[in-house]
Amino acid sequence: MSHTPPKNQALRQTALTCALLIAPLAVGLTACGSGGNPLAASPHEAAADVSYGTAAGGKADPNKPLKVTVKDGSRITDVTATDAAGRYIRGRLSADGGDWQSTAPLAAGVHYTVRVSTEDSNGHPGRKVLTFDTTSADAGLHVSFGPDAGTYGVGQPLTAVLSKPVHTKAARAAVEGNLRVSSTPAAAKGSWYWVDDKTLHYRPQSYWPADATISVSSTLSGVRVQDKLYGGADKPLTLHTGDRIEAITDAGTDQMTFKDNGKVVRTIPITTGKPGFDTRNGIKVVLEKQQFVQMKSESIGIAAGSSDSYDLPVYWATRVTWSGEYVHAAPWSEGSQGYANVSHGCTGMSTANAEWFFEHVRQGDVVQVVHSQGPTMTPFDNGFGDWNLAWSQWQKGSALGVSGGTAPPPATSGQGQTDVNSTPVNAPARLRPQTL
């Protein structure tokens, strides 16, 4: 007769059997736990093991590499260094793990976080987080954009003037690569041109769109340009364009064709430079407008008392070169306007037409002279002749292009040209020459 143990006794036997089976397994797990595998342990604080250099006066010198080291008996297994924007610093770890050093320049005026992973002689992992700031670039390279904010014609180039000269192609590429230009509506492809070591001009392949918003800014802040020279933070610029105004001055027919957004709205009889004083050919843009100018021949090198000397009040004067070429009222030559070229280089028209022209143009509008016997306006030394360079030539002025950024030497005026003395863009108006 079989004997069945009481229910409680059966349960106790089952529990004991399971416990006996689990016990050896638990011993095995203990043997393979964190006590037997150092890598499974939580990383310890390795502050005492890790040190770094570059600090000077509480901040790091961005001209020196960042170097992280550990004391004897430990080694570095990994380093991650990022700035506040999440950009990484490239670096190199020594073969023995004793030190790590940055291989890319630090940025100036930036906060860095460095995460260092280590391992001691027993294989136990450690971790240290370091933070530091680099010294400011406020005294570094700054960019001033031009022209002033406002509304301009579609021929107005952008300018960027640097606070310090930049000579090498690599340094110029660092600068140019951090200058941003955008247009809404989108303009044609554009490019910067290095006029000299401190001056850049920007233009699209063709004129800006009408009624556009144009923005230009710099991302140079903290960027290393060349040895010990870093970019600073600078103010962006936003400007606008109006209608597409083009005044085509034909010195062969003595007529000006005035176009607004491609539509001819007025044809004006004119006179341009006579032989020996021929008006420059090419594309110019309006530089400024002066309702009244006292024009004197001495300002362009014509001696007082000579047959070509003059000292006259001139009204409704629209300047297109710094050396003295204007579109202006010339009531003394109305009999020749539309028939002959009798001026000293300016484009003359009746007082009524000059006033109308004055009121319908703004800075940056296009004034193009064709069929004159004069030379072509030079690109940079006498106003904005930027558009007189073919696009293939313009691209050669970029430091980012294949040919680099070398500007041609300033051209001199042709023989007999009236306005031979170029005047800087920022010269006071009273010192600027005028032609008639």
Image (cartoon, rainbow, N blue to C red):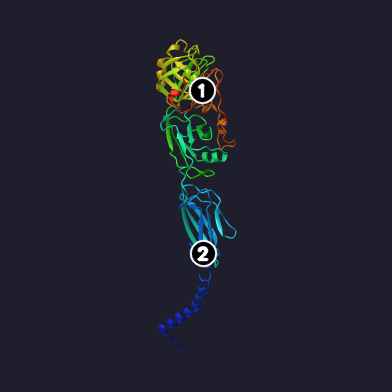
User: What element does badge 1 sit on?
Assistant: loop
Using the image, determine if residue 242 lies above or below residue 296.
below
Closer-to-camera residue (60/319): 60
Residue at 54% over, 15% down: 276
Q: Which mark is residue 421?
A: 1
Residue 148, numbered circle: none
Residue for badge 2: 125
Q: Is residue 436 visible?
A: no
**How many neighbours does mark 1 have within 10 angstroms: few (below 14), some (14-19), or many (20 or more)?**
some
Count residues near mark 2 (Cα–Cα under 10 Å), then give few for <14, some for 14-19, many for 20+.
many
State how far apart marks 2 and 1 are (Cα). 75 Å
Residue 14: x %, y % from top left: 45, 80
Q: Residue furthest bottom?
A: 1
User: Picture quarter containing residue 6?
Assistant: bottom left
Q: Which dot, 2 or 1, sits closer to the camera?
A: 1
Mark 1: which amino acid? Asn
**Whole-percent x and y of residue 304?**
48, 14
Q: Earlier in the sequence, mark 2 or mark 1?
A: 2
Q: Position of residue 104 (x, y in %)?
A: 54, 49
Q: Which residue is pictured at 54% across the width and 62% down the height?
A: 71
Measured along the vertical axis of the image, is residue 241 above or below residue 352? Answer: below
**Amino acid type, residue under disc 2 in the picture:** Pro
Which secondary structure, mark 2?
strand
Along the viewing direction, whichever of 166 and 341 lies nearer the viewer: 166
- Position of residue 235 measured from the top left corner of the image (x, y, whole percent): 43, 39
The answer to the question of whether label 2 and label 1 lie on touching residues, with beta carbons closer than 8 A, is: no
